[in-house]
């Protein structure tokens, strides 16, 4: 059990956002929330720890799942277990609830936070895909006191590469905001792996749309593990938009999705297999959604 | 050179004050610094559940938790679990059902089962299976472990 982590010089556990942002402004900070990604990545040398280890778990105001002003705000420190236990998430954001239900294991769900999952920015991150389909935005804060500034970045622009986001070093992700889905909203999440628990997705899919009579509108489809970041599938969305999700339309959307994805071959699957999965599983998820 | 930090926490009901290296995991703190070797080091990356402990009443992988993050919190290890009524019933039930072979996964499973029963005193089999999905056992094939937990659940439910 050799400790392979080097260079942490100080530990801080601020209690207020102002304090946390002041520490971040000083630079050289690793942000610790649940630690379920930070610890193994640091140990493996994939993401060495910075000189300052800042534990944000005691920062006030970063918890809670609340509906207000047409938006569901999820605090950055909300754990996957808390999302899974939330009636608001289960009833109003089914794709996110389903992703949380299939997330890792109980031990990890109890600790892992939504903010950490987003900032870790894995192309296969489980909550990222449904949040992208639900048109969520990341709320980023920087600066203390009067110099405080906050910006909202749609998740479609938040991820910039594997393990990378547009969060600046002096910024803290404080919340995720999801527009309240309108009446008639339908959606689903599907994750494919070799076993249900503790598996990194081979691919994952989330669909969100609004039923308007016989047709679907505001169709948003997101895919995980098929590109350097989680992505939307605009061609597949266009194939469904304003149409009735019959078998021919669903097949057209599944075909169109193959133009949207750019999978790689890795130890979990070949690019060919991932394409097959995207086509077949999108067909399955859309058939399911069309019957909701 | 490692830098240390002073932390205060409760371990199996006893208040502790310690100095821990900033990079240390809670698993290393328990095993190497405090000699509580009931908590096992399996994979060291949150895949196997052998290092499961309770922190503020919920189960976590201690290998993924920084020791400094124990500050101000309440930890219960398998040594603490076994001192409680549910822990004793689980131990007896694991023995009775033959749910232990090599025994390496057993402490983690006992702790996780304790958490599972605290959340849901009368879980059905599916809930038990889902509850222990983060604990690997390479000997038993899980059937006897599920039976052992279900037996305790039924006992607690009716008793």
Image (tube, rainbow, N blue to C red):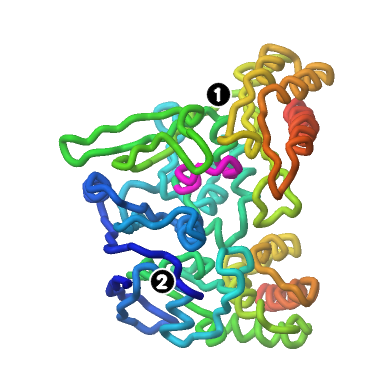
The chain ID associated with circle 2 is B
User: Which residue appears at 73% of the width and 15% of the height?
Assistant: A214
Q: In the structure shown, which secondary structural element does the residue marked by tag 2 occupy?
A: loop
Badge 1: residue crowd in 10 Å (few <14, some 14–19, many ≥20): few
**Range drawn in magenta:** A116-127
The chain ID associated with circle 1 is A
User: Which residue appears at 45% of the width and 53% of the height?
Assistant: A47
User: Which residue appears at 80% of the width and 32% of the height?
Assistant: A280
- In this view, the residue farthest toward the top is A242
Count of all numbered marks drawn on residues in the image:
2
Instruction: Report whether A62 appears left or right of A105.
Output: left
Q: Which mark is residue B24?
A: 2
Mark 2 and mark 1: Cα distance apart in space: 47 Å
Q: In the structure shown, which secondary structural element does the residue marked by tag 1 occupy?
A: loop
Residue A54 lies, in percent from the top left, at 32, 56
Residue B78 within the magenta-colored segment of the rendering = no
Among the 4 quarters of the image, the one containing residue A210 = top right
Q: Name the mark nearer the viewer: 2 or 1.
A: 2
Question: Is residue A292 visible to the viewer in this orientation of the structure?
Answer: no
Query: Relative to residue B2, is residue A232 depicted above or below?
Result: above
Question: Is residue B130 visible to the viewer in this orientation of the structure?
Answer: yes
Residue hosting label 1? A182
Badge 2: residue crowd in 10 Å (few <14, some 14–19, many ≥20): many
Query: Relative to residue B9, is residue A47 depicted above or below?
Result: above
Q: Nearer the viewer, residue A89 or A1?
A: A1
Residue B117 lies, in percent from the top left, at 61, 70
């Amino acid at each position: 059990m050799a400790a392979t982590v080097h260079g942490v010089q100080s530990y801080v556990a601020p209690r207020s956002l102002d304090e946390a942002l002041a520490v971040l402004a000083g630079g050289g900070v690793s942000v610790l929330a649940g630690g379920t990604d930070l610890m193994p990545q640091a140990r493996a040398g994939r993401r060495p720890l910075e000189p300052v280890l800042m534990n944000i778990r005691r920062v006030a105001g970063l918890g809670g799942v609340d509906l207000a002003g047409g938006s569901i705000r999820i605090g950055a420190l909300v754990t996957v277990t808390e999302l899974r236990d939330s009636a608001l998430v289960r009833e109003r954001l089914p794709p996110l609830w389903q992703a949380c239900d299939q997330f890792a294991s109980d031990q990890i769900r109890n600790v892992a936070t939504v903010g950490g999952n987003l900032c870790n920015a894995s192309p296969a991150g489980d909550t990222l895909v449904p949040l992208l389909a639900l048109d969520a935005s990341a709320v980023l804060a920087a600066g203390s006191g009067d110099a405080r500034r906050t910006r909202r970045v749609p998740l479609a622009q938040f991820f910039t590469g594997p393990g990378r986001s547009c969060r600046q070093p002096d910024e803290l992700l404080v919340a995720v905001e999801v527009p309240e889905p309108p009446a008639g909203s339908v959606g689903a999440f599907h994750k494919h792996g070799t076993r249900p628990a503790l598996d990194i997705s081979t691919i994952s899919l989330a669909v969100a749309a609004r039923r308007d009579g016989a047709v679907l509108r505001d169709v948003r489809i997101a895919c995980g593990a098929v590109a350097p970041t989680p992505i939307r599938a605009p061609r597949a969305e266009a194939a469904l938009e304003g149409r009735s999700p019959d078998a021919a339309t669903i097949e057209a959307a599944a075909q169109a999705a193959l133009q949207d994805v750019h999978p790689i071959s890795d130890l979990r699957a070949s690019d060919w297999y991932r394409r097959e999965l995207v086509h077949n599983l999108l067909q399955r998820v859309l058939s399911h959604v069309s019957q909701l | 050179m490692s830098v240390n930090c002073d932390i205060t926490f409760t371990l199996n009901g006893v208040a502790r004050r310690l100095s821990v290296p900033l990079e240390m995991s809670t698993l290393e703190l328990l095993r190497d610094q405090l000699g509580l070797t009931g908590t096992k080091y399996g994979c060291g990356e949150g895949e196997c559940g052998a290092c499961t402990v309770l922190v503020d009443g919920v189960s976590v992988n201690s290998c993924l938790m920084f020791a400094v993050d124990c500050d101000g919190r309440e930890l219960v290890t398998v040594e603490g679990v076994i001192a409680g009524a549910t822990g004793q019933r689980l131990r007896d039930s694991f023995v009775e059902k033959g749910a232990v072979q090599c025994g390496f996964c057993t402490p983690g499973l006992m702790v996780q089962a304790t958490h599972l029963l605290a959340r849901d005193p009368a879980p059905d089999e599916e809930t038990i299976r889902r509850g222990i999905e983060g604990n690997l056992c390479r000997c038993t094939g899980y059937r006897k472990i599920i039976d052992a937990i279900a037996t305790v659940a039924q006992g607690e439910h009716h008793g």
